[in-house]
Amino acid sequence: MDNLKYRMGLLREALQDAEIAFQQVVLTPLHDGAKTLRERASHWLNSVQNREQITGQDLNEGSWAILMDLYVNQGVRTVSVSSACIGSGHPPTSALRWIKRLIELGLVVREVDDLDGRRAHLVLTSEAETAILAHLGN
């Protein structure tokens, strides 16, 4: 019985130490001027909740991944439909549905490749770019 009490005491101390360490990680900035992890998480949560207000549409994570991929690569390289599907991190059939929806919403334009008519590239519309900039600026 004494051995059990001793082990329970050690476990209690370990849990208290873990809680203190967790609080330090969450509340302490990662480096000078950096936000704490809690502030970053709060910012992320707010940005997810604000997406619908920015675009006027309820877009899922895959759709936002495609929009972000197009935004990041805008002016750097063209993004083919197949590349956008891969970049979404979801099955191609789902990504193709989301791309179709983004086109219907006027956020993305599908352009046929001049050199290879079998391939198409996706381009953000100016409305989508404005929405993304507003979203990232929050």
Image (cartoon, rainbow, N blue to C red):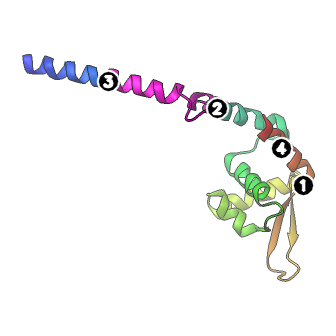
Q: Earlier in the sequence, mark 2 or mark 1?
A: 2
* Place of residue 14 in the rendered image (x, y in percent of width and height, measured from the top left): 28, 25
Q: Foreground mark, 1 or 3?
A: 3
Name the amino acid, label 3.
Leu
User: Which stretch is magenta?
Assistant: 16-41
Which residue corresponds to mark 2? 33
Q: Nearer the viewer, mark 4 or mark 1?
A: 4
Contact between marks 4 and 2 (CB within 8 A): the answer is: no
In the rendered image, which residue does mark 4 sit on?
133
Q: Main secondary structure of the magenta part?
A: helix
Which residue extends farthest bottom? 115
Q: Is residue 56 magenta?
A: no
Q: Tell me, for residue 15, which label it has, or none.
A: 3
Please say if the residues under marks 1 and 3 sit with CB atoms less than 8 Å apart.
no
Which mark sits nearer the N-terminus, 3 or 2?
3
Mark pair 4, 3: CA separation: 43 Å
Tell me where residue 22 sits by quadrant. Answer: top left
How crowded is the residue under tag 4: few (<14 C-alpha within 10 Å), some, or many (20+)? few
The Cα atoms of the two marked residues, 1 and 3, are separated by 52 Å
- Figure quadrant of the N terminus: top left
Q: Does the magenta portion include 25?
A: yes
Residue pointed to by mark 1:
125
| Label total for image | 4
Amino acid at the residue labelled 1: Thr
| Label 4 with label 1: CB-CB less than 8 Å | no
Pointer 4 or 3: first along the chain: 3
